[in-house]
Image (cartoon, rainbow, N blue to C red):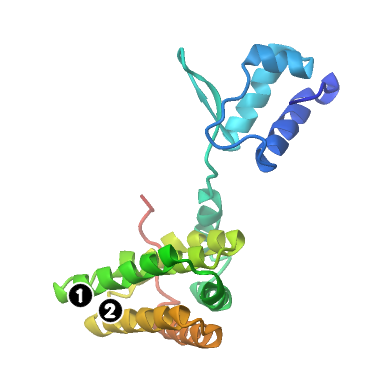
Amino acid sequence: MFRKVQAVRASKDVVAQVEQAIFSGRLSPGDRLPSERELAEQFGLSRITVRDALRILESNGLIEIKVGASGGAFVREPNFDPLRNSLSSMLKFKKASILELAEARKVIETATAELATQRATPEDLQALRSAVEAARQSLDTGDLYYMPHSVSFHIALAQAAKNSVLYLTVNSFRTLFFNVLEQLLPTVDMAERAIEDHWAILQAIEAGDGARARQLMMEHLTYFENKVRALQDGPLFEREES
């Protein structure tokens, strides 16, 4: 699977080759890499050099090294938390404003809504419907904590768009979305508006009406933007994320 490398840049080349094998799909999440001894033979390097490269790959979040009889180096599932954490840090250090986040959502999530009208599967539609129904049931019991259901709807919508970059971007908003909604101290009218908007967007997607889905999402997110505008001078992130 791997070719021999020049010793002068050994660790770097080992890391690069394993990364390429992962990114190209030749190695998938859960796959076990060859042992240190086997890798050393394939690369023509010492086990110490190979071990150093594996540690770099582990620190980059690409592999997990397990100990024991059934241990070894295993390819990890992709971890996109760093992107979400970077966005959170940008807001905390005032490198970006919450209104810029709201503006970005209008650009990105209107596109996901339109694409979903073309690409949503029956399973996607059911996930969207379930999120709306869960929010309704929550409201009927007097529980205004609708944030998890709202986030679930937007994540399901991004999934329905069948665009990995858009899905990753929307998913990276998740923690920030929770923080902002908590600051808004949701009321009955806000919960009802969110449910009505989500239901209308779902109906547009089921009808295959991309223009209407885009417009409805724009109106929905503009409402959200107007709500957070009053908070732009407030401490949105006083608590540390758990």
Residue that sits furthest to the front in the current view: 122
Disc 1 + disc 2, Cβ < 8 Å: yes
Task: Identify whether 80 is placed above or below 147.
Answer: above
Which x, y percent locates residue 214?
53, 83
Residue visible at 42% across and 60% down in the picture = 175
Which amino acid type corresponds to the residue marked 1 in the rendered image?
Answer: Leu
Q: Earlier in the sequence, mark 1 or mark 2?
A: 1
Return the mark for residue 62: none
Residue visible at 27% across and 76% down in the picture = 186
The residue carrying mark 2 is 191
The residue carrying mark 1 is 139
The answer to whether one can see residue 182 in this image is no
Task: Identify whether 125 is placed above or below 191.
Answer: above
Which x, y percent locates residue 73?
56, 24
Instruction: Name the residue nearer the viewer: 203 or 190.
Output: 203
Instruction: Name the residue nearer the viewer: 188 or 18.
Output: 18
Q: Secondary structure at mark 2?
A: helix
Which x, y percent locates residue 170?
51, 65
Task: Identify whether 60 is placed above or below 171.
Answer: above
Residue visible at 30% across and 82% down in the picture = 190
Horizontal side of residue 63 vs 201, given as left or right: right
The answer to whether one can see residue 56 in this image is yes
Residue visible at 78% across and 29% down in the picture = 13
Horizontal side of residue 230 vs 25, given as left or right: left
